Image (cartoon, coloured by chain):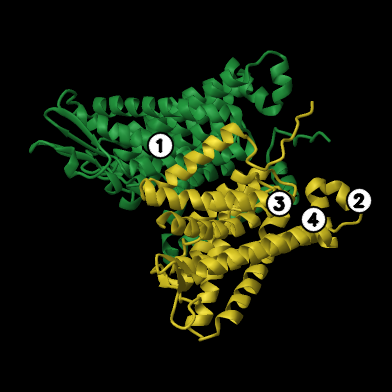
Chain colours: A green, B yellow
């Protein structure tokens, strides 16, 4: 305890975040082995992990870099479908399930990173809402393209096509992996809660170390005042690219984890609404606050499930909760009340 | 001839986008917020019109007027309850609230009207014809297309006159330039912003009726995709600019219809968005957007 107090505040805060995730994992595992978890909640464990990773990675773009991204699900989609194809291709060479999951997720992450290198060109040129609309457009383009792609695998290797399943000319023993609008089918369920937990730890390590590194400080300096930061020799393109690509790679990994939790997955799953959902996690958790993203993502994924008693009304209640939370957390009168509860951190005075 | 008829349907679709984009652009110009719930106001307008004509048997004209009034009231109420308390909050907080409102409207519609698509009645057919055939039947122009384009042009002219020559319009321009200074000059900023939302939502109702007359299926999610497209159109033309919204909307509509007809139906959205990205790379503030010089 003494040692915890002597740490730098940022290190302490990081340790609290790691500790929180580890405790949450231990509690969930205990509940799982005790059979106390409802099956509907059990099915949510891996998606929660994927959404936590998505929220943390989007926080790098929105919170740390300060640019609004409305197409984060696009990277998730690229990661998800690449990982699914990779996992099917590696089925005979890598027999161990967890290893295959890790390798195919990594391939998914790399693919998302490569795609983000294309998107980063407008990201460096545009600002504000114009950038937001480009990321939105990109997410929709990805969804549309995946909706038209057919991929099959047989003894000779991969077959790609844009028309239909028959035009691929698969051999008799071949297997369809991606069927255009029907999405990816016949996915082996490789994901597990433990894998999700490890991915969250990896993501936290990457994100927190990035934020507290020289590069992270440079990105935040660019966010707070681009002109001042540039004038002391910080290159905007270099550091923004670093933050953006890191965020995309993490999203790709999360996509791989998410996709391999289901037996089939559609490109429609990763549309504009999913991007917005993740943005909601980030904003509710607090921009630039990694721990907040983790909590908000987990809580808001479980919330609709907890509201199941309201049946038809649950999404309506969800919307009302969302609006009310935004109104209360941003209301000046409520802010002072909140500030009183925060012991040890006196309310910051705003510069006029 | 198919080129010509595609062009006409593109312009007609583009006019609808332009009317929706006007709502986005006006609200953005004055309140500096992206009103994501705008697309869902379109859907509400469509449903209001549908209910009064199909269930109550009203004549289309009062039904459309009721839809406009209903959406205007809805816009003002939403602004008062959800956006006004957040006037000084960070823009992303307002954005999330707008998303909340959008979810709310969609789910409320789902509860009220169910998820099964409703078939919107055809208003614009005269003496049994839905359009006029020109050039010996080779070219068919629907009445809906004609009315849509006319309505769009009328709205554009009315809005330009309104913002340019009335006291309220002057107040709107002043608020969009500098809220603080406008307040000091005795302009009621809150009232001006409410008015903007009212006009934008009223336009959304008109767009909703036109959209549902052109594509006659009505679902709780009907408004979301046209909403996104119109937002794209607003940015395409330069957000905050009224002629930009018209230009952006028309171009987007024409590109979409041509991509559907000549390239691929499935990829048409991807093509629209790809063109948008290319345009923004060349002109980073949209076609008619103002280039704001950065000052240190």
Specify few, some or many for label 3: CA neighbours under 10 Å numbering under 14, 14-19, or 20 or more: many
Q: Are marks 2 and 1 in contact (CB under 8 Å)?
A: no
Distance between the Cα atoms at labels 2 and 3?
21 Å
Confirm whether circles 3 and 1 share one chain: no
Task: Identify the residue position indicated by label 3 in the image.
Answer: B86
First-in-chain label (4 vs 3): 3
Residue B54 at x, y percent in the picture: 47, 81
For disc 3, the chain is B
Label number found at residue B184: 2
Task: Report the front residue among A18 and B197.
Answer: B197
Q: SS at mark 3?
A: helix
Q: Residue B258 vs residue A215: left or right?
A: left
First-in-chain label (2 vs 4): 4
Distance between the Cα atoms at labels 4 and 1?
41 Å
Q: Are marks 2 and 4 in contact (CB under 8 Å)?
A: no
Q: Quadrant of the C terminus of chain B?
A: top right
Residue drawn at point x = 60 percent, y = 18 percent: A7
How many numbered markers are drawn?
Answer: 4
Confirm whether circles 4 and 3 share one chain: yes
First-in-chain label (2 vs 3): 3
Label number found at residue A60: none
Q: SS at mark 2?
A: helix
Residue B101 at x, y percent in the picture: 58, 58
Q: Are marks 2 and 3 in contact (CB under 8 Å)?
A: no
In the rendered view, tell whether residue B103 sits above or below residue A277: below
Confirm whether circles 4 and 1 share one chain: no
């Amino acid at each position: 305890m003494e040692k915890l107090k002597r740490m730098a505040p940022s290190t302490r805060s990081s340790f609290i975040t790691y500790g929180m995730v580890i405790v949450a994992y231990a509690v969930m595992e205990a509940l799982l082995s005790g059979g106390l978890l409802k099956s509907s909640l059990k099915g949510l464990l891996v998606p929660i992990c994927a959404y936590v990773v998505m929220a943390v990675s989007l926080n790098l773009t929105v919170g740390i870099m300060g640019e609004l991204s409305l197409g984060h699900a696009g990277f998730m989609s690229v990661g998800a479908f690449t990982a699914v194809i990779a996992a099917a291709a590696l089925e005979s060479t890598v027999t161990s399930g967890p290893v295959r999951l890790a390798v195919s997720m990594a391939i998914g992450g790399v693919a998302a990173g490569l795609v983000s290198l294309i998107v980063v060109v407008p990201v460096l040129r545009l600002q504000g809402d114009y950038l937001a609309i480009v990321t939105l457009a990109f997410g929709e383009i990805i969804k549309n393209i995946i909706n038209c792609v057919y991929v099959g695998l047989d003894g000779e290797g991969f077959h790609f096509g844009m028309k239909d399943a028959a035009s691929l000319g698969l051999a008799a023993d071949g297997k369809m992996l991606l069927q255009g609008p029907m999405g990816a089918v016949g996915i082996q369920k490789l994901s597990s809660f433990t894998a999700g937990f490890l991915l969250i730890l990896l993501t936290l390590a990457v994100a927190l170390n990035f934020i507290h590194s020289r590069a992270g400080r440079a990105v935040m300096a660019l966010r707070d005042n681009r002109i001042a930061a540039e004038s002391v020799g910080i290159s905007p393109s270099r550091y923004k690219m670093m933050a953006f690509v890191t965020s995309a790679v993490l999203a790709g990994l999360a996509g791989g984890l998410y996709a391999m939790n289901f037996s089939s997955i559609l490109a429609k799953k990763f549309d504009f609404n999913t991007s917005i959902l993740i943005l909601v996690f980030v904003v509710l958790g607090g921009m630039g606050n990694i721990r907040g993203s983790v909590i908000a993502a987990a809580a808001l994924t479980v919330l609709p499930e907890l509201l199941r008693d309201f049946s038809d009304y649950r999404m309506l209640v969800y919307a009302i909760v969302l609006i009310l939370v935004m109104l209360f957390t941003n209301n000046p009168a409520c802010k002072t009340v909140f500030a009183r509860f925060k012991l040890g951190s006196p309310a910051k005075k705003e510069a006029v | 001839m198919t080129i010509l008829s595609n062009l006409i349907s593109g312009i007609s679709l583009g006019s609808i986008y332009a009317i929706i984009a006007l709502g986005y652009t006006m609200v953005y110009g004055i309140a500096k917020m992206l009103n994501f719930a705008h697309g869902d106001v379109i859907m509400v307008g469509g449903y209001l019109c549908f209910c009064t004509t199909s269930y109550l048997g009203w004549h289309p004209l009062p039904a459309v007027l009721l839809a406009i009034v209903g959406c205007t009231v809805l816009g003002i109420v939403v602004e008062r309850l959800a956006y006004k308390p957040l006037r000084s909050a960070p823009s992303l907080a307002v954005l999330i609230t707008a998303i909340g409102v959008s979810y709310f409207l969609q789910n409320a519609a789902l509860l009220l009207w169910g998820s099964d698509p409703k078939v919107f009645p055809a208003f614009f057919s005269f003496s049994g014809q839905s359009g006029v055939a020109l050039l010996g039947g080779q070219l068919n122009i629907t009445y809906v297309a004609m009315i849509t384009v006319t309505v769009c042009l009328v709205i554009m002219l009315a809005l330009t006159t309104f913002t340019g020559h009335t006291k309220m319009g002057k107040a709107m321009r002043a608020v969009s330039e500098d809220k603080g200074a406008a307040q000091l000059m005795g302009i009621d900023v809150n009232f001006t912003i409410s008015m903007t939302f009212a006009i934008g939502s009223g336009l959304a109702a008109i767009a909703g009726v036109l959209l549902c007359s052109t594509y006659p299926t009505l679902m709780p999610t009907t408004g979301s995709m046209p909403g996104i497209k119109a937002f794209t159109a607003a940015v395409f033309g330069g957000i905050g600019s009224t002629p930009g919204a018209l230009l952006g909307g028309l171009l987007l509509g024409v590109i979409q219809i041509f991509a559907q007809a000549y390239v691929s139906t499935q990829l048409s959205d991807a093509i629209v968005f790809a063109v948008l990205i290319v345009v923004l790379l060349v002109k980073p503030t949209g076609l008619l957007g103002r280039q704001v010089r950065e000052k240190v």
